């Protein structure tokens, strides 16, 4: 779709080419991505009816308590998820974000996704708020390693003999203080921020856009539909990120 055909859904009349020009002039850019960008690659949410596994809900399996009680069951679920994710590839939106990073001196990508598609697309400076399903962490020595074996051995153990768990943030666990600090620094220092494919509901990520605005950044939302954040954004583009973002390059 030509740049001129994208219409804005707010008071300010920003066109996509205006955002493109602003991007080229920006010294520091921050981007927040959510499940919507991965959905364009075909990745299921794993929380809806199509994401159920053996009639278990994620809230029943993605917890420290569930892992302590039955680590084999939890790992069987994560093995199924990993095998499902292994078939998907980065889409045009992932690639465009990696392209933006190459052009901006100070760039930070903050993602709520654990699927690792941003890394496969070539993004480097990434803050993964909820971890990464392709990393494992030892419960004994704490060592974190990348593991893309599919299917993974059930149960997987560290070389030290300790049991490995997925290096993701489970229900009931706190986000990494280090990751949050890095995210806040990037948000506070950016002059342009994109909010892409996220509902604007889950905290603390839902507050990032408003924090960036308070610090003087221009904040642009890209989503297939309006969200609770839309009314507060400087610009909201309705459509697929894979159609919109490549045009910024």
Image (cartoon, helix red, strand yellow):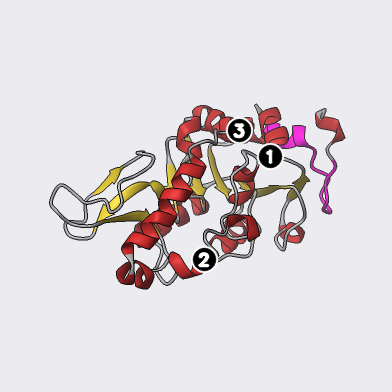
Which residue position is annotated with label 3? 91
Residue 20 is covered by the magenta coloring: yes
Evaluate whether residue 220 shows in this view: yes
Per the image, label 3 sits on a secondary structure element best described as: loop
Identified at 45% across, 55% down, the residue is 129
Q: Please identify the residue farthest to the left as the structure is shown.
A: 160
Residue 52 is covered by the magenta coloring: no
Distance in Å between CA atoms under marks 3 and 1: 9 Å
Q: Is residue 56 left or right of residue 158?
A: right
Which residue position is annotated with label 1? 241
Q: Are there few (<14), some (14-19), or many (20+) residues within 10 Å of tag 1?
A: many
Q: Are marks 3 and 2 in contact (CB under 8 Å)?
A: no
Identified at 41% across, 49% down, the residue is 79
Q: Are there few (<14), some (14-19), or many (20+) residues within 10 Å of tag 2?
A: few
* Residue 153: image location, x then y, percent: 30, 46
Say the numbered circle drawn on residue 56.
2
Nearest the camera: 188 or 69? 69
Nearest the camera: 59 or 191? 59
Identified at 72% across, 63% down, the residue is 228
């Amino acid at each position: 779709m030509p740049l001129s055909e994208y219409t804005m859904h707010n008071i300010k009349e920003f066109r996509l080419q205006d955002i493109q020009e602003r991007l080229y002039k920006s010294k520091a850019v921050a981007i927040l991505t959510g499940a919507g960008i991965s959905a364009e690659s075909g990745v299921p949410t794993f929380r809806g009816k199509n994401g159920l596994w053996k009639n278990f809900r994620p809230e029943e399996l993605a917890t420290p308590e569930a892992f302590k009680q039955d680590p084999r069951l939890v790992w069987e679920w994560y093995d199924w998820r990993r095998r499902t994710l292994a078939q998907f590839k980065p889409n045009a939106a992932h690639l465009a974000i990696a392209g933006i990073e190459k052009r901006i001196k100070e760039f930070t990508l903050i993602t709520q996704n654990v699927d690792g598609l941003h890394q496969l697309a070539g993004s480097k400076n990434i803050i993964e708020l909820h971890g990464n399903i392709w990393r494992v962490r030892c419960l004994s020595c704490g060592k974190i390693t990348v593991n893309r074996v599919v299917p993974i051995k059930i149960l997987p153990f560290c070389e030290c003999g300790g049991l490995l768990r997925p290096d993701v943030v489970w229900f009931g666990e706190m986000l990494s203080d280090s990751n949050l600090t890095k995210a806040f620094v990037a948000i506070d220092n950016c002059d342009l921020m994109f909010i892409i494919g996220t509902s604007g509901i889950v905290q603390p990520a839902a507050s990032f856009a408003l924090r960036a605005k308070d610090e003087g950044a221009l904040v642009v939302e890209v989503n297939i539909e309006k969200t609770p954040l839309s009314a507060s954004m400087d610009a909201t583009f309705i459509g697929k990120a894979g159609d919109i973002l490549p045009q910024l390059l």
